[in-house]
Image (cartoon, helix red, strand yellow):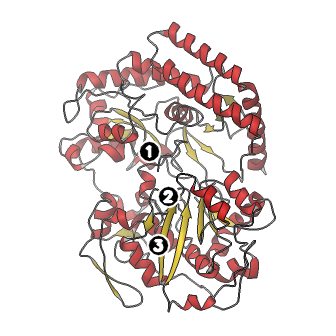
Amino acid sequence: MKDKTGKMSLTRKQFLSLAAITGAGAAMSGCSLSGGSSTGSGSTTTADTSVLDNKDTISLTVFSQTANFSGAQAGWSAALLKDKFNIELTIIPDVNGTFETRMQKGDLGDIVVFGDNGTDYKEAIDKGLLYDWEDEDLVKNYGPDIESYFSDSLEANRTISGDDKIHGIANYLTNKSGEHDMFSYEWGLRWDLYEQLGYPEIKDWDGLIDVLGKMKALCPTGDTGDSTYGLSIWPDWDGNMVMYVKALASGYYGYDELGFGLYDSSNGDFYDALEEDGPYLKALKFCNKMYRAGLLDPDSMTQTYDTMISKAQNGDVLFSLFNYAGTIAFNKDAHVAKNEWFAPKAPDDAHTIVYGLAPCGQTRIWSIGAKTQYPEKCMQLLNYLCSPTGAMGIWYGIKGLMWDYDDNKNTYFTDLGKTCYSDATTDMTGTTWTGESGTSYDLSGTFNDGLLQANNITWAPGADNPDSNGERFDEVFWKSTVADPKCDAESDWRDKTGANNTQEYLESTNFSVVAAANYAADEKDSELELKWSQVKTAICNGSWKAMYADDDASFESLVSDMRSTCSGYGYDDCVSWCKDQAEKRYGLQES
C-alpha cells in the first residue's frame, strides 16, 4: 500500500505488503460458542448463532479502506479460513466513491476496516452503521483474546468513538507499555563502498553528501549500466508535504508528521513546514544540495514508486532513508555474490525516529458492520486474528506448515516458510496441507496471493509475542534467524558496529521514540478544508521547484514564493489548527 505519511506503520509499501492480514494455524483459545441473539447499533437483524458450529459455509464481505485487491479471497489463507471457520471472504476496496455509496445504502459490509479513526469512522458511527461490541456481550462472549490482551485498546476505542460505545479495535497493538516498534528509518547505504573509502565520518547532512559523492565516483553505474545516484525519490506518496522531505526531517530530528509540520512528542513543540531554519526546510535544503552535487536522481519529480524501487533493486541508488528501498530491496543473492551490501550508517547528529507502542494501538480500525447477519462469526474471526497465533500468520503464514515453535518456545521457519518469507512470489501450487478438521487441501497460487487482502494488522511486529520464549513477533529477533554473515561486507559491518542486524545497530545509536497517544485529529470546517487543500498543493509544488534550484539564491527565492502563495491561501489559519492539535495530542499523550 502506498503510505502517504512515509511511516512504516506505517512507511509501508514493501514491509506491509508482507503484513497484509492473514489467518494462521492454531485454534482460537477459549472461544465461547454459546447461543443467543445480538443486534448492533442501527441493526434490526437477529443473529443466527448456529453458524458457529461450522456446519454451513458462511460468506462474509470485508470492506477495507486499506485494501489493494477486489474479489474472493484465494490461496492458502482461503483454505485455512475454510477449514477453521468454514467461511469464505470477499474483499471490497474503497475505490471510486465506494465508501460514500455504501454509506448511502446503509450497509458497509460484515467486517469493516477503516484507514484511520477520523471522519469516515465517526460518520459511520453517527449513522448507526457499526456494531456495538458490548451489545449482548458480543466481545465478552466471542472475543476472549481481544478482552484478555487488549482491554485498554477497547476502552481507547470507546473514547475515540465519541458515543461511549465500543465499535472496534485499533491496529499495531501491544498488551503492555514501554515498547517501541521496529526501526524502518534506517539510514542505509552501500557499505562495501563505504568500507573502500575507509569509513569516513558522517556527522550531519553535509557529511552524508560528501560520502555519497565519493561513493558515486567509486561506483558510477548500477547493474544495468545506468547512472548511480545518492538518492532517488518519488512524488506518489506526497501528502500535506513532500513525503520524502518530511520523512528526512522526521528521521533526522525524531519528530513526527502533524498536518503542515513536525511534532516533537518529547515536549509537544510544533514546527511548521515553512518556518525559517525549521526541520522541513532544512531537509528540503539537503535535497537541493544533493541535486546540485549531481546526487539526486533527476527523475525524482516525475517517476513512480515502482520505477524507483526497480532502480534500488538494480543498484542504481547508493542511499535510502527507508529499509524497504534500501536493505530489503538491494541485499539479494546476486549482490551478495559480488560482496555488495546495503547496511545502516546513521549520521552522528541524527536522532532516528521510531514509533512507540501503546496498548491503545494506532489509528486503523477493525470493526463490524451493523447490518451483518453474523456478528458472532465476525467477532470469532477478529478474535482469532488478535490471538498471537493469528497475528503470526499476518507475516509468516500457516503454523506448522510455514513456521512453528520448538520445544523451548523459540520461533523458527520451516523450509517452505523461509522460502516464502524471502520471496513472496513463491508458487505454492502443489503444496498439500491438512487442516485441524482432518481435511486435506491442495494449495494454489503464490504465497503473496494467499495473504488475506484486507491489508491491516493486529499486533505490532515490534511487540513481544506472549506465546514465544521472550521473542518479538518480527523474525529479526528470533534466535533461529541469527545467521552467519552472507558476505565479507556484511561481516565487516557487524565487526564495525558490534550488531548482528539493523535493529540491534539502531538500538545502539541516538534515537527518538515518538510516544503513542489515544489521539484522533479534529474535523475541519468547510472553509478550513478549502484553505488546507490549496496550501497542500502549494507546499508540494513549491518544494519540488525549490529542490531543483540551481543555487542558494534561487532556492531562497523559490521558498519565499512558496511562503507568499501559502499565506494568500490561509496558511496561518492552517498552522493555528495544527498547533491546537499538537497541544491536544501532547495532553492525551501525557495523560
Q: Amino acid at mark 2?
A: Ala
Nearest to N terminus: mark 1 or mark 2: 2
**Does residue 395 sit above or below 229 in this rendering?**
below
Find the distance from the CA under tag 1 to the CA under tag 2. 33 Å
Please state which of residues 492 and 193 is positioned toward the viewer in this rendering: 193
Residue marked by disc 2: 67
- Does residue 576 appear to the left or right of 448 in the view shown? right
Find the distance from the CA under tag 3 to the CA under tag 1. 32 Å
Residue 161 is drawn in which quadrant?
bottom right
- Report the number of discs: 3
Residue at 64% of width from left, 58% of height from top? 361
Please state which of residues 421 and 448 is positioned toward the viewer in this rendering: 448
Let me know if residue 45 appears in the view: yes
Instruction: For mark 2, give the secondary structure.
Output: loop
Q: Check residue 23 in the rendering and tell me which mark sits there, or answer none.
A: 3
Instruction: For mark 1, give the secondary structure.
Output: helix
Residue 75 is drawn in which quadrant?
bottom left
Let me know if residue 364 appears in the view: no
Q: Check residue 575 in the rendering and tell me which mark sits there, or answer none.
A: none
* For the residues bearing labels 1 and 2, Cβ distance under 8 angstroms: no
Q: Amino acid at mark 1?
A: Tyr
Residue at 40% of width from left, 30% of height from top? 302
Instruction: For mark 3, give the secondary structure.
Output: loop
Nearest to N terminus: mark 2 or mark 3: 3
Residue marked by disc 1: 505
**Does residue 424 sit above or below 260 in this rendering?**
below
What x and y, as percent, mark residue 171?
59, 60
Label 1 or label 2, whichever lies nearer to me, is 2
Q: Residues within 10 Å of mark 2 (few under 14, many from 20)?
A: many
What x and y, as percent, mark residue 334?
20, 46
Nearest to N terminus: mark 3 or mark 1: 3
Label 2 or label 3, whichever lies nearer to me, is 2
